[in-house]
């Protein structure tokens, strides 16, 4: 029987790469995103390759939308084997004392509350079948804190704590939980953080070989293909040229 994976935030970057990689692994896909045009175009691209896809357009920040879509799935899509909580973002890079509250709320609502809403809707389906695997996209920012990263780092520290708590809460139900914590990955991440400032965003990745979205997708594919008795709790993935959140070897 074909396995089903649900991936949030597939309209760009890591989410899109993960969905494509899991499709290659033989999964049918439930894909979600806020940007309807991008979502439907991506779903069609997969469907044209013969992949079974259910696209769902909603914002993970809205608990009612999450419930409406994920707690009323068609019967044939309810046996979710893998959930990839990928939707997330950084907005702004300000010291706390001059932080923009709207940016804080956007990050907290997406990175923390969005992950919780989606997980709360999907975990009962996994518990019902007594198996499943949740992949939470954390960050090196969830392991340490860097200047002006205050609230973004706090949200990713929350993902770290939630992942540990979820591992404990689902242990009796044969559900795996894995946190993937990337370092610098060249995606739309910095464009979003710097609110469309392309020049500033490009500077982040200059002078070293950053990770690609496909590198993270490969790591996730590795984790979901392990034997049933093996679970990777936590994985930190860095470019060779990056030692921690602030130290890079740039040429």
Image (tube, rainbow, N blue to C red):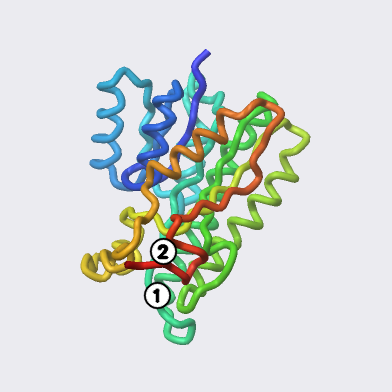
Nearest the camera: 237 or 21?
237
Q: Which quadrant would residue 175 be assigned to in this image?
A: top right
Determine whether, in the image, residue 100 is placed left or right of residue 75: left
Q: Which residue is mark 1?
A: 93
Which residue is found at the position 48% from the left and 60% from the top? 109
Disc 1 crowd, CA 10 A, few/some/many (<14, 14-19, 20+)? some
Dot 2: few (<14), some (14–19), or many (≥20) neighbours within 10 Å? many
Residue 62, x across and y down, in percent: 46, 52
Question: How far is mark 2 from mark 1, CA to CA?
Answer: 8 Å
User: Can you say whether 30 is above or below 11 in the image?
Assistant: above
Q: Residue at left 56%, top 42%?
A: 135
Q: Which mark is residue 176?
A: none
Give the structural element (helix, strand or loop) at label 2. Answer: loop
Outermost residue toward the top in this view: 1
Which x, y percent locates residue 83?
53, 37
Seen at 50% across and 31% down, the residue is 72
Q: Which residue lies under the disc numbered 2? A: 90
Q: Could you tell me residue 63's position as x and y percent?
A: 50, 49
Asked if disc 2 and disc 1 are in contact, CB closer than 8 Å, the reply is yes
């Amino acid at each position: 029987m074909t396995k089903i994976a649900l991936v949030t935030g597939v309209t760009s970057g890591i989410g899109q790469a993960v969905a494509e990689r899991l499709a290659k692994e033989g999964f049918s896909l439930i894909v979600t995103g806020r940007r309807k045009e991008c979502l439907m175009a991506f779903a069609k691209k997969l469907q044209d390759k013969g992949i079974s896809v259910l696209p769902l357009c909603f914002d993970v920040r809205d608990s009612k939308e999450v419930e409406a879509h994920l707690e009323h799935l068609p019967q044939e899509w309810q046996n979710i084997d893998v959930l990839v909580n990928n939707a997330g973002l950084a907005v702004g890079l300000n010291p706390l004392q001059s932080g923009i509250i709207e940016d804080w709320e956007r990050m907290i609502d997406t990175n923390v509350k969005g992950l919780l809403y989606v997980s709360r809707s999907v975990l009962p389906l996994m518990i019902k079948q007594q198996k499943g695997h949740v992949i939470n996209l954390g960050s090196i920012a969830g392991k340490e804190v860097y200047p002006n990263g205050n609230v973004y780092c706090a949200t990713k520290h929350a993902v770290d704590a939630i992942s540990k708590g979820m591992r404990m809460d689902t242990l009796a139900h044969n559900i795996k939980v894995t946190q993937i914590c990337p370092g610098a990955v060249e995606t739309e991440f910095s464009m979003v953080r710097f609110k469309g400032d392309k020049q500033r965003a490009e500077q982040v990745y200059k002078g070293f070989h950053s990770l690609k979205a496909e590198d993270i997708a490969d790591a996730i594919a590795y984790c979901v293909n392990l034997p049933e008795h093996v679970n990777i709790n936590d994985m930190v993935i860095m470019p060779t040229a990056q030692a921690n959140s602030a130290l890079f070897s740039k040429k």
